[in-house]
Image (cartoon, grey):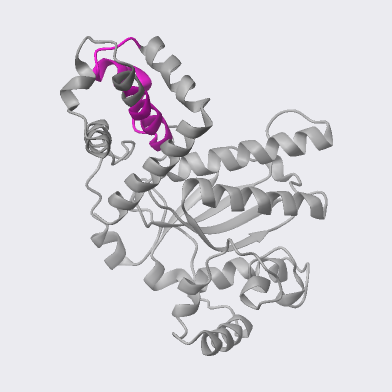
Amino acid sequence: MARKPRIHYPGAFYHVILRGNNKQQIFFSSKDQQYFYSLLEESITRYNYRIHAFCLMTNHVHLLLQIGVIPLSKIMQNLCFRYTQMINKLQHKVGHLFQGRYKAILVDVDSYLLELVRYIHLNPVRAKMVSNVEDYHWSSHRTYRKLDKNPWLTKNVVLSYFDQNENIAAIRYLNFMHDNISESLNLTTSTQHTYDILGDDDFLQGLQINVEMKKYPISLENITRMVCLHYSINQSNLTDKSRSRVNTKLRATIGWLVKEFNICTLSNVAKFFSRDPTGLSRSIRNIESENKTKKELNELKNLIEKSICQA
């Protein structure tokens, strides 16, 4: 059976669930959870997204995150791969740690954000691991309560649903958490679509996705245009037959951005510029190896992300 396509658009909220392979344990000591935290913090900085709530259980993880320009698939692939590498090394194991493909549910935040946050935070209580939600040390609830410090967690969005005043919002959040969990929260996703959505009819009708499911919305042409504008270069220079170092570096820069944004293959980029894919790949490796150039690349990438999100 073919995999369900993912929906991607900047600003989308997802409830992501990572499960251990065959329901196996994925955290074996507190150092494992701390390492997972460090990966989340690094990932947020690298891929420019937000985490609004989380809960690390013994054999699975819940994340409520909001993506930017970078696709969710790239974020999760990096996170799962790096954590699996570390655990396999410590446990002297090989193979998969997580169960197949992670589950990702697109969330209608206006209707479900608060209930979903409560659902995620109450996981340990429902599993009878603790009787009081404050006693569980591996969820974002304690950060909302200022009992733990996780500066990479975004709290203001959730708290703003209670009140604009932070102190009042914190009190109302606590009262909300200690109310009985709503029977109205239904995590069964929509059956009207080939993808998973947690939202009401208005959300489903208003989604109106206008891009192909597996096609990233930023195009090679737009990336090329923005790079040429940034460096004040005529785009036609990149397709001529000269071997100018400047043009070679710019083509490599575009190739690197295409790879980072997961737009298309390097073969497509090489064809676009009438160049050999092997040579382009070599040029990309060269600029990646230079610390000064790598800094410039990341700054340019951030500029492009901001311009797209503000468009």
- The magenta segment is 251-276
* Residue 72, image x, y percentages: 46, 45
Quarter of the rendering containing residue 21: top right
Q: Horizontally, is 258 left or right of 34 in the view? A: left
Residue 101 seen in this snapshot: no
For the point 79% across and 33% down, the residue is: 89
The answer to whether residue 272 is above or below residue 253 is above
Which residue is at 59% across, 42% downward? 79
Residue 257 in magenta?
Answer: yes
| Image label count | 0
* Residue at 47% from the left image edge and 60% from the top image edge: 188
Q: Nearer the viewer, residue 133 or 253?
A: 253
Judge by depth and name the residue closer to the eye, 219 or 61.
219
Left or right of 295? Residue 220 is: left
Q: Position of residue 81 (x, y in %)?
A: 62, 36
**Considering depth in this image, is 23 or 136 the residue closer to the camera?**
136
The relative height of residue 66 versus residue 184 in the rendered view (above or below) is above
Residue 275 on the magenta span: yes
Q: Is residue 133 placed above or below 254 in the rendered structure?
A: below
On the picture, is 130 further left or further right than 303? right
Residue at 36%, 13% (x, y): give it: 277
Chief SS of the magenta region: helix
Where residue 257 sits, quadrant-wise, is: top left
Residue 300 image point, x, y percent: 37, 41
